[in-house]
Image: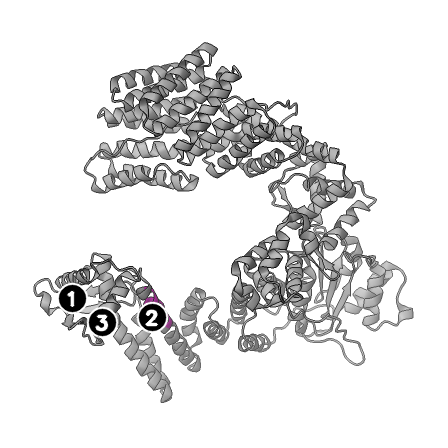
Amino acid sequence: MTFLMLGGLEVRNSEGRLIPIPRLKQRQLLVALLLKANTPASFEYLTDALWGDDPPASAEQNLKTYVHTLRRLLSPDAPRSAPIETQANTYLVTLGEDDLDLLAFREHVRRGRRATQDHQAEAAHHHYQRALDLWRGDPFTNARGTRVLNDAAAGLGEERLTALEEFSAIRLDLERYAEAVPDLRAAAGANPTRERLWGQLMLALHGAGDRAAALHAYERLAKAVMERTGLEPSPTLRDLHRRIISSTEVARPASPGPERSAGTSATAGNVPVPRQLPRDPGGFVGRAEELVRLRSLLSPWDGGLPHHVVAITGPPGAGKSALTIRAAHAVRDRFPDGQLYANLHGATPGLRPLEPLEVLGRFLRALGVAPQAVPTDVDEAAALWRSLLDGRNVLVVLDDAVDLPQVRPLLSVPEGNTVLVNSRRTFALVDDCVHVPLGRLRNVEATAMLAKLSGAERTGRDPEATTRLVELCGGLPLAVAVAGARLANRPRWEVADLVERLRDERRRLRELEAGDIAVRSSLGVSYDLLTGSADHLDREAARALRALGVLRVPDVTPHVVGALLDVPADEAERALERLADGHLVEADGAGRYRLHDLVRLFASEQALHRETRKTLDEMLNRALEFYISVVCLAARILQHPRYPRWTSAGVTVDVTPLPLVSPDEAHEWLEHERVALVAAASQAMAAAGERTARLGVALAFAFYWFLYYSGASSDLSLISRQTLETGRRLYDHDIKANAHNYVAVALEMNNRAAEAVPHLQRQLDLCRQLSDPHGEQKALGSLAVIYSYQERYEEMLHCAEEQLRVSKAIGHRSGEHYAMAYIGLAHHRLGRLDQALAVLNDALDKIRKDDDIRSYHEAIVLEKLGEVHVDRGDPASAKTCYENALTCARTAKVGVAEPYLLLGLARASRLLGEIDEAADHLERSAAGVREMGIKDLDRQLAEEEAALREARGEEAAPVRRVMTP
């Protein structure tokens, strides 16, 4: 009998046939015993291996049962002959190397190590090869699940990697480089920060003649180590990297200058070799991906020529200068004829930007031109600049460029030279320029930076506060640096102390100051350049930035900004693009723009400073009116019910909406704007101004039903509570009545039906006081829904009949059809199947004749007809009803209904014997429940799943779903 565990657990008999071990606990017991092969396994050890820290009270008896069963599985004819012995309170499995692959692996590794010590490389190679060939995959993947077994699997994986490293060292000594590459490449890829593996891979690739791949392997390792630790690879790996780079001279293509290899100096005699780079930033952390790309552009791995112009662009405080200098130092050896550097002061508070001629003059003098010989004309100086660089390898670093005109005369450098420039502006118009845009730091990079500045011990004491501090800094390197400096200068502060200070948005920018370094002043330079510009577009961009500080939404479109500014959308778009060019807003390429959190706070400050309260209110109100107009248009296009009718909340809106035409276009707009709509309505309802608050309520009422149809339960809860609070604050009974209904619907959606009843009863009272029959019938319909959940079927029937009466009196056909659906449901629940069928069929006929929102109400009635047919023993008719209801729900884009209808389809299909189809419907229903956070289907899904597993046609509990009006 052979036991295999270096891969999925397998047991084979003496003839090589597989012996199945069907149950997980049996496999786990066998693995636990095999891990202790030839050593007694105690009861305590086996209990821990099978159940961890929570064994059952019957663990001892269970273990005996499992051992007995395992013996029978291994030796059905003679269980006592199975290799599991009982010794006192222990169990022993006695096996040899040929019986268990783990023992064979360890023996071959032992022999390989002995051969290595005896300098018998070929013998060592043989044993390591035999050892590693025993592995079929990760150890016993089909028997894990407890801490003991998971840890054991990890330990075996480490043994395998160690053996592979030792084997690879032998292969490298034997110069079998190509042979070593595949195994090393696979193992290194699975262990992205294991430096010994990556070093061996680099040596193997280089030895096999693939120098470029060896260098690329190092960059992959460097990126992974930087992302995980914020550090560089070890000195040993960095030295290996340098040796591989310098080990082969690669001839560069012929050029107009003197012939030489790339990276060799053309200067001789007394020609100056400038070394002007500032000190390499010692505290630099992160930007691993960007550094890898910059190195590949500035010092290509194949020894080719560097790229002509490389521009690092990004928002204020993104760390452009630090990355530029770090990258320049990393490739300085590639430019033996010198490195020139100039800070152009494009965004230095209090200093004017350098003129192009000033920069040219500095560089020409550094290259040996006598001061009196430096031309005073920009074009002449640029021509001399190009002549002096011809045939050289010089790196030119232009730090903090204000714009393209400032640096254009310096960019046209001869082949072999590179200009590395950084700026807040884009350089899209530069020929042969590669852009390296900077966004926010990754959380792991920002955390590593903070730890390096303020002390790893301090950040490690409170990881939760550290994470929150990084979030409050928005991943902006300057903000993280200031936060780290403040903590470093205040040793008695904990990270949580600074988090508390930054939590208040009103003081966050003030707190992010350390000496003369501040986020506010960094942003202020870019803003001042816009406000002080002679260009009208720049000044309009500054106004747009202030407007963006007024509306607190995640992102905006030009139409929204046009509403804020009261200008056409195309004018707003030009202003936004100007802000995007200066990296003050982020553009996602789909016509949407967003602000970094700290930029938003700065914009809000400027808005409060430069605009009157009246102007700010008008801006916000125009944006709200725009949102309301488009939501109402989208609802009309989608044929969302006039029931519930849009409630104006006491305000009129007369704004031209977006030209939406098709239902798909309307639905897409609502989906894209959903988060912004919730944020804008919430902001407005919290405002002091009455009109703004009413507009917020009106917006919430306008898109509330879209949220419901989409299954956005958390948004529903937030917005409904706020509408009720606003109605109370404004003493507006009409708002309160509608808000009570919406709060109830949100509660019902979150499976809290009992809490919804008082809200609906209060709505009913208010509507009767206000003589509002439309609101009255809506409250009655909603009460019918809640009573159905509570199984109060007589009260449900009464409310539905009352809704039918009121709806008929005011000629509200949709209300009549909805009421009939719940009258039918009530009869069904009360066991009156024939009455239920008659009422529901009558409702369906009426809907198909005269309902202007047919798809929605048809889906409601068809769902209930499906339930009736199931209980009447007609699953075929039920399936047809559910399929048609699903089509209607999708037409009406009522996504929240789909999980319920799919569950009904699963049940009907199962009863028809269509088990595979039923399983598919059930799986899709469960997926919808998870996606939408629906809380009232868990029991029914579990029951249907159990029924499907048994596949005996047993009837599951009735589907209790009732679609809310």
Tell which circle, 2 or 3, labels the residue nearer the N-terminal end: 3
Q: Nearer the viewer, residue 539 or 475?
A: 475
Inspect the image, locate mark 1, and give the three-letter code of the amino acid beneath it: Asn
Disc number at residue 41? 3
* Tag nearer the camera, 2 or 3: 3
Q: Secondary structure at mark 3?
A: strand
Q: Quadrant of the N terminus?
A: bottom left
Residue plotted at (80% across, 58% down): 409
Instruction: Reply yes or no: does residue 154 show up in magenta.
Output: yes
- Picture layout, residue 324 above or below residue 949: below
Secondary structure of the residue carrying numbered label 1: loop
- Quadrant in the picture for the C terminus: top left
Rendered image coloring scheme: one colour
Q: Amino acid at mark 3?
A: Ala
Q: Position of residue 524 (x, y in %)?
A: 75, 51
Q: Is residue 882 magenta?
A: no
Q: Quadrant of residue 864?
A: top left
Q: Is residue 129 above or below residue 396?
A: below
Residue that mark 2 sits on: 156
Residue 256: image quadrant is bottom right
User: From which residue to which does the magenta span run?
Assistant: 150-158
Where does label 1 land, which residue?
Answer: 13
Residue placed furthest toward the right: 372
Q: Is residue 25 visible?
A: yes
**The disc labelled 2 sits on which kind of residue?**
Leu
